[in-house]
Amino acid sequence: MNRYSNLLAGCLCAFTCETIYGLSYLFTKQAVENATPLALLGWRFVIAAAAMSLCACLGLIKIRLKDKSLRPLLLIALFNPGLYFIGETLGIRYTTASESGVILACIPVASLIASALILHEKPHRQQVLGILVTLAGVLITVLAVGVTSSLSVPGYLLLLGSIAVYALYCVYVDKASDFTGGEITYVMLVAGAVLFGVMALGEAALAGDMAGLLRLPFTDSGFLTAVLYQALCSSVLGVFLSNVAIAKIGVNRTSSFIGVSTVVSILAGALILKEPFTTYQIVGAAVILAGIYIANTYHEKEYRHTP
């Protein structure tokens, strides 16, 4: 595959991944009405890991981990889904929606810094500009719905920690060149199933509602729909596309697409949930798309090559 094909494939993977994540907003709102975030995460990763394992058994994907050191993959899984989802979930719980949106919008900037410090990949000036423009667009759309303050220092620290570990996840996926996107995704999902499955069971046991957790997908159709989307689309397909995008176009280009999920979630909320759609959100969405365009249209002498 030549360098231009790699660029196109990587950008399409990143764009599709963020579109999937943007649509997950609809399903998450529906799921958490009758379930805790840990119940959703537990079922999400258990189903995702089971689906990925089934695909491997049927030969639809190839997982060859024998005689390979799993340390790089376990490190990736520790960052994401492990620490990232814990920090994000608790951080959002202790802060307001606008605060968490503003802080998490800084992920592309953190990824760019981590890439420069750890991978020694000096970002192009136009790439930095594009990411900053995207960040501005996200901030406009988040602040358009109103600013409220929680003044929760633990919440802020958890969200900032989430940004840091997501950036580390990106750079270590980039470094895991001995593994395919499928292998990285598989280990991430299995690790998530073990971690969040155990945490969900522990939460249910403390609440004395173990049976309720186990039968939740079978008694709540809304939760089942949400968890299937989160598991099969967001976790299996979305994570796989993200890992492939990082391998093909690098951390900085991939991170520049994160704003797409914001645009998609706003459009989905307005068109499907009939939520308010303000002029400021339209401006913010346009700025986000402009930033993505700027970040991905500069010319390099060489694009990365992947087999």
Image (tube, helix red, strand yellow):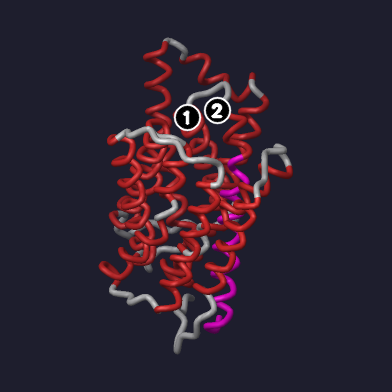
On the image, the x and y values in percent for residue 209 come to: 47, 12
Kind of residue at badge 1: Pro
Q: Image height check: is 91 above or below 291?
A: above
Q: Nearer the viewer, residue 139 or 165?
A: 139
C-beta proximity under 8 Å, tags 2 and 1: yes
Element type where label 1 sits in the image: helix
The residue that disc 2 covers is: 32
Q: Quadrant of residue 90?
A: top left
On the image, the x and y values in percent for residue 180 come to: 45, 63
Magenta: predominant secondary structure element? helix
Q: Where are the magenta residues, as a range?
A: 1-25
Question: In the image, which disc is placed on residue 37?
Answer: 1
Kind of residue at badge 2: Val
Mark before the other along the chain sequence, 2 or 1: 2
Q: The N terminus lies in which quarter of the figure?
A: bottom right
Tell me the residue at 56%/55% (across/down).
Answer: 18
Q: Nearer the viewer, residue 221 or 94?
A: 94
> Does residue 303 appear to the left or right of 263 in the view shown?
left
Q: Quadrant of residue 179?
A: bottom left
Element type where label 2 sits in the image: loop
Tell me the residue at 65%/47% (across/down).
Answer: 278
On the image, the x and y values in percent for residue 85 come to: 40, 41
Most extreme residue toward the bottom is: 301
Question: In the image, which disc is placed on residue 72?
Answer: none
Tell me the residue at 63%/22% (across/down).
Answer: 218
